[in-house]
Image (cartoon, coloured by chain):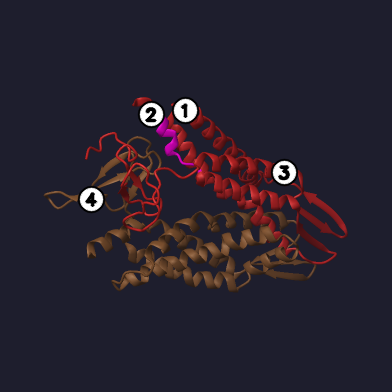
Amino acid sequence: MSAAEATALAASCARCHDCGLLCRLPGPAPHGARCARCGAELHLRKPGSLERTWALVIAAALCYVPANVFPVMMVTSFGQVASDTIFSGVIYFLTHGMWPLAVVVFVASIFVPVLKLASLTFLLISVQRRSSWRPVERTRLYRVTEAIGRWSMVDIFAITILVALVRLGNLATIDAGPGAVFFGAVVVITMLAAESFDPRLIWDRIEVRKA
Amino acid sequence: MRAVTGSGVVIRLVACEDCDLLHRLGEVPEGGAANCRRCRGLLRRRPRNGLEHTLALALAAAVLFVVANVFPFLAFEMKGRITETTLVSGVVDLYNQGKQEIAILVLFTIVVAPLCQIALLLWVLLPLRWNRVPWQLPHAFRLLRHVQPWSMMEVFIIGILVAIVKLMGMATIVPGLALWSFVLLMLALAGAVSSFEPEAVWERLEARA
């Protein structure tokens, strides 16, 4: 078998999603074929990748608006209620001179979700337009998008801890706001979106052009 | 697919996960990795330390997990009143406030997913230690792979830091025993996961067969 510059697809083989074993497919339509080693169903590409990723990206973008508009946290102290949105949380740290933390929260809660939505949208459009522009860099962009998603959870975790610690009745109480639920949804849905995108689609277009 | 050359070296044909290019792969040296020559994606890595190392770290993580979840991890003192919280009681408070979605998300990412990782690693590595084939091995690997992205202990540590700084001006924060064991747990589990390569287990089983 010649392995030089050929893809698994061209050699009618598929890499098992679960254990990574390269399996030869019995026919052109590999429906129901299973991995010889771990028994997982084999697919040449992630099934319905573009449709699924688009649906999740749009859902995440819709949740992103209420996540930023509604308060994520309400602080009650001595009977007075102050509410915080994600953005005002960053401003709070800035005005109190804690700029390293302001940077951490800004990157985790504002920059990363926007970057994820923008880069997934860009990858989807570039694949659909059959672009052959810089495939190595686009693949790297995908890997970064997949790796950074989890860091957006910082705010959700901080709120959980504040809610758990500060419950002193009239003296001081902290409650989670509706924005936190939407923000959590953005993080989960964008992680699922990154997972459902198949970076091999970037390279398939280039293979087609070469042929 | 694999072939054995005349000199006894096993050559495997592998496809890049990110760009599908086929490669002929010989032995990867210990502590080394092989990358795709087209997209630079990771093809295969061989951690320096063997499965025994992973097993030791997974056992340490199991002990630390219990300590981290039983003892309070932060105490908060304001005007003589003290409140303490454990990981689970924090989640319960959130649940009772009507934020069930967030409570479930937090419980899953810092308690359930790490617990699954530890349990699955032990599930696979303990039988192998005594040269037995782990029961339901493919399912264990599949679950381990799916649970991994949702285990977020290192992110939780940063969350704790943000919360502590926010409360600093307001009250006294006392870190508890569980906080330190949580940090150690994160390190042990990260070490266990990064030194674990399912391919090494498959190879060991292939060698037996």
Between marks 3 and 2, how big is the CA–CA gap? Answer: 42 Å
Between marks 1 and 2, how big is the CA–CA gap? Answer: 9 Å
Name the residue tied to disc 1. Answer: A130
- Residue in front for this viewpoint, B148 or A160: B148
Q: Are marks 3 and 2 on the same chain?
A: yes
Name the residue tied to disc 4. Answer: B2
Name the quarter where the C terminus of chain B is drawn: bottom left
Mark 3 residue crowding within 10 angstroms, few (<14) / some (14–19) / many (20+): some
Name the residue tied to disc 3. Answer: A68
Between marks 4 and 1, how big is the CA–CA gap? Answer: 34 Å
Question: Seen from this angle, which residue lies furthest right?
Answer: A79
Mark 1 falls on what kind of element?
A: loop
Q: Residue at x 59, y 57 (%)?
A: B156
What span is in magenta? Answer: A197-207
Q: Are marks 4 and 1 on the same chain?
A: no
Q: Residue at x 39, y 38 (%)?
A: B19
Do tag 3 and tag 1 residues touch (Cβ < 8 Å)?
A: no
